Amino acid sequence: MVNLHDLVAFCDTLLERDRFQDYCPNGLQVQGRDEVRRIVSGVSASQALIDAAIERGADAVVVHHGYFWRGEDPRVIGMKARRLSALLRHDISLIAYHLPLDAHAEIGNNARLATDLGATVAGRFGPADIAMYGELDAAVGGEKLAACLTARLGRVPLHVAADRPIRRLGWCSGAAQDYLEQAAALGLDAYISGEISERTWHTARELGIHYFAAGHHATERYGVRALGERLAAQFALVHEFVDEPNPA
């Protein structure tokens, strides 16, 4: 058991919350009961995840995608009202970390992708240095890397192929397709992100770099799970990661 504010303070320090200028507030977004014994983690604070937390008797929900995004309608109506009402009615806290959880060198989404790919991290790029690049132990073809991503992430990536073997690659989870030109400028052979935009296809082909869109949800499952596991170990909490299926 741990006090809610001690739990959040630990997360804020671990993930260096104050280092990031983000699109949403990081940390405690909805305050529930003071003492936390059981937590549920998941990628996004959907109604399905909230319902799962209620069913499991969770005291707090830890997510990568929380609420109160820049530019969203500030009114508490409709879907937002239903979600917040469920959390408040059951006295469940919502704790969310966006860019800090992409960037963390050990439990972040991109660090976990490096481990899954067997890549050695050589450096970072992109806003707040959240994207990473590095090398594989040996050069592989595009089809082999696509098969590796499929096996690791459970989702077949969309692959824009280039006529070159892949040894040096960059990656950034989620909606990071627009870092592709920076990846090419670094001389990388391939770049992996979660989403693809229409323009990304043309950019990759014209720059002669492999591009893999491996899924926003698929590339961001592992950081929040690792955070939940770290909190469980640190404070002797009961933790469950709930992976709500999402093909996007």
Image: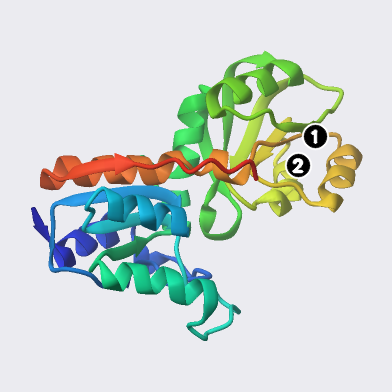
* Structural distance between the alpha carbons of marks 1 and 2: 7 Å
Residue 163 horizontal/vertical position (percent): 87, 23
Asked if residue 20 can be seen in this view, the reply is: yes
Q: Residues within 10 Å of mark 2 (few under 14, many from 20)?
A: many
Q: Is 79 rendered above or below residue 149?
A: below
* Label 1 residue SS: loop
Q: Are marks 1 and 2 in contact (CB under 8 Å)?
A: yes
Q: Which residue is mark 1?
A: 209
Left/right of residue 16 with respect to residue 33 in the rendered view: right
Front residue (pair 240, 142)? 240
Q: Quadrant of the C terminus?
A: top right
Q: Which mark is residue 23?
A: none
Q: Amino acid at mark 2?
A: Ala
200 or 50: which is nearer to us? 50
SS at badge 2: helix
Where residue 134 appears, as percent x and y from the top left, is: 57, 32
Give x and y (percent) for residue 84.
Answer: 39, 73
| Picture quadrant of residue 32 | bottom left
Q: Which mark is residue 184?
A: 2
Which is in the foreground here, disc 1 or disc 2? 1
Judged left or right of residue 230, residue 68 is right
Q: Residue at x 79, y 51 (%)?
A: 197
Q: Residues within 10 Å of mark 1 (few under 14, many from 20)?
A: many
Relative to the observer, which residue lies in front, 185 or 11? 11
* Residue in front for this viewpoint, 240 or 29: 240
Disc 1 residue type?
Ile
Q: How many marks?
A: 2
